[in-house]
Amino acid sequence: MIPDQEGPATPSGADRFDDEHYPAYTMGRAADMLGATQGFLRSLDEAGLITPQRSAGGHRRYSRYQLRLAARVRELVDQGTAVDAACRIVTLEDQLHEAQRANAELRAED
């Protein structure tokens, strides 16, 4: 059966493939992808850097965006930086990048 071509478009599960904020990864899978422990991911939640969504069963679920942040922190931690400090560094780097982007936009308007 072919879906109604003229009806309103309804979002499907396939639309979520490109959504970097969709919480597609379980804690175990996320930890495996990062080469980290689940405790490391919990520490990022405790530090306030990442707040994973919860499944209906209460399990943490992570998005690709959150995993990219976690990977940046992991690099700093691997270099000897404390987790809390690494989280703060990543946050400040992102704030600086956003401020630079906003400044560039304002300059372009002049």
Image: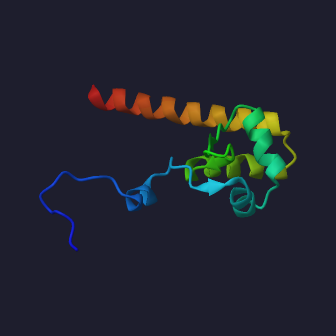
Q: Is residue 32 above or below residue 21?
A: below
Quarter of the picture holding the N terminus: bottom left
User: From the viewer's perspective, is 110 left or right of 57?
Assistant: left
Tell which of 78 and 3 is nearer to you: 3
Q: Residue furthest left?
A: 6
Residue 28 at x, y = what percent? 74, 58
Residue 84 at x, y = what percent? 80, 34
Quarter of the picture holding the C terminus: top left
User: What residue do we see at 62% from left, 36% from top?
Assistant: 93
Q: Residue furthest bottom?
A: 1
User: From the viewer's perspective, is 67 left or right of 47?
Assistant: left
Residue 53 at x, y = what percent? 61, 41
User: From the viewer's perspective, is 36 left or right of 54?
Assistant: right
Tell which of 67 and 26 is nearer to you: 26
User: What residue do we see at 76% from left, 46% from top?
Assistant: 41
Residue 69 at x, y = what percent? 64, 46
User: What residue do we see at 75% from left, 40% from top?
Assistant: 44
Tell which of 1 and 15 is nearer to you: 1
